[in-house]
Amino acid sequence: MAYMSCKGLSLGYDGKKIASHINFEINKGDYLCIVGENGAGKSTLIKTLLHLQDAIEGEIITGDGFKAYEMGYLPQQTMVQKDFPATVWEVVLSGNIAHMGKKPFYGKKEKQLAEEKLKELGMWEFRKKCYRNLSGGQQQRTLLARALCATTKIILLDEPVTGLDPKVTAAFYELINKLNKNGITVIMVSHDLQALSYASHILHITRDESFFGTKKQYMKQEIAKQFLSLGGEKKWQIL
Amino acid sequence: MANIIRQLQFYLTYPFVQYALIVGVLIAFCSSLLGVTLVLKRFSFIGDGLSHVAFGAMAVATLFKLTNNTLFIMPVTIAAAILLLRTGQNTKLKGDAAIAMLSVGALAIGYLVLNIFSTSANVSGDVCSTLFGSTSILTLTNDEVKLCISMSIVVVAFFCVFYNRIFTVTFDENFTKATGKYVAFYNLMIAIITAVIIVLAMNLVGSLLITALLIFPALSAMRIMYSFKGVVIYSAILSVMGALVGMLISILFSTPVGSTIVAIDILIFLMNCLMGKLMRR
């Protein structure tokens, strides 16, 4: 059984549909890339998957030991966070909130997990640094560490490389790929065609006919050729 | 100098001065704890709006000649806090516009009511003292002091127990929601506690100046501190210091309590700005 399968999902706000007939499933170890034009409903899909809003139609079924609210979320940065006084350690530790139940304070277990994730992502030496003074790539690693504290199963990344320079972007994708190889399921929303190169599955959202399949299947689709050609010949070859 | 100390010692023997100092310090402490969250969540104006609502409620309460005004003002302000939070999430009426509407509305109605139905000969004097604080901090009854102490304990206890949750909600609401936590509950609690503190603080600095008590310590602390815990602790220290020094000055030189405290807070803010600039060099 799949971690999560979505059947006949329709998304939108206030009863107004912006995308419908979305069908896909995510299995353990998958690397799903969600693409689509601006306004196609990518952000809405994310909010729906995170239970921040309800789907208009259709259902999301979880299974294989994965429960709702077990997703580690790496959001797009908000203005509030840009000047928030908090250390890297405080931010990463806060990811533990996901599995603490009613316990009010962090214990040894939570601190160990945070330390482990920080070391894994190469951010341990920055733990006492202020989050707002970090570079864009370091901030994303911090948020990634927090997401990993919240989950062991699926991480969901919402346009994680926005505003990063090409070198940092490449390193970040490499890191995500490594995590995926180590067994974490990845769902990534991206504008960036480079992201597709690591993906195992693609979900392309359009208004009424969304495509879902493996990357190989996707490449044969007309919709893929149209979408990818926007990036020019060179981008096409990366894949 | 020795003269001033002798004078202070003389004043401090009076119980009403002791009460005022205790209440002032407690209110300053609680408001600084909450202020950090309000500032970081971009909720500073909720404090402002609520204080005006509290003023309106006060005016209506005097109209009914209730024995204990707080019993009326508190529920009204809490209701307004809940209302403001709800409209903030409603896209039709934007949060800031709703706050502005409610705050000037309450101010106008409050003044109107005081003016039309007032029995006192000095209406503008009454209004002025409710808006900018008055000597009412020196006329606190034993019950009011007890109420203030118990409310402060509740606020501090809430803040300590939910400290980690408050941090997560403040830093990233969506992330917290995605972990299945009831963010709405924490937002509601923060709004209610803000309302409670504002009603308590009305005695100290008056309803127009409460926002200063909420935001100045937090903003000052944020100039220098870079961890959340640091900001919370430092802003509490600054706030208590500011309130204490302000009250002592106002007792010694008989200046208005509220504006003296706020003036000291401004001074503290400027000093921290300067220190922050120097440290970053």
Image: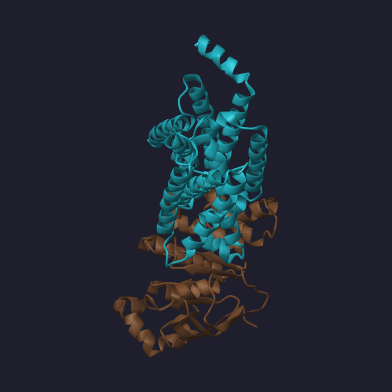
Rendered residue at 67%/78% (across/down): A64
- Whether residue B114 is visible here, answered yes or no, is yes
Q: Colour of chain A?
A: brown
Quadrant containing the N terminus of chain A in the rendered view = bottom right
Quadrant containing the C terminus of chain A in the rendered view = bottom left
- Whether residue A93 is visible here, answered yes or no, is no
Q: Eyeballing the image, is B38 above or below A117?
A: above
Q: Which chain is cyan?
A: B
Q: Nearer the viewer, residue B15 or B8?
A: B15
Q: Eyeballing the image, is A43 above or below A162?
A: below
Residue A81's x, y, as percent? Answer: 46, 54
Residue B154's x, y, as percent? Answer: 66, 45
Location of residue A109 (image quadrant): bottom right
Looking at the image, how many numbered discs can be counted on the residues?
A: 0
- In this rendering, position of residue A15 left or right of residue A114: left
Rendered residue at 52%/41% (across/down): B231
Q: Eyeballing the image, is B55 above or below A102?
A: above
Figure colour scheme: by chain
Q: Nearer the viewer, residue B33 or B2?
A: B2
Q: Nearer the viewer, residue A229 or B158?
A: B158
Rendered residue at 54%/39% (across/down): B201
Residue B234's x, y, as percent? Answer: 53, 36
- In this rendering, position of residue A92 left or right of residue B269: right
The residue sitting at the top extreme is B2
Residue A7's x, y, as percent? Answer: 56, 86
Rendered residue at 57%/66% (across/down): B178
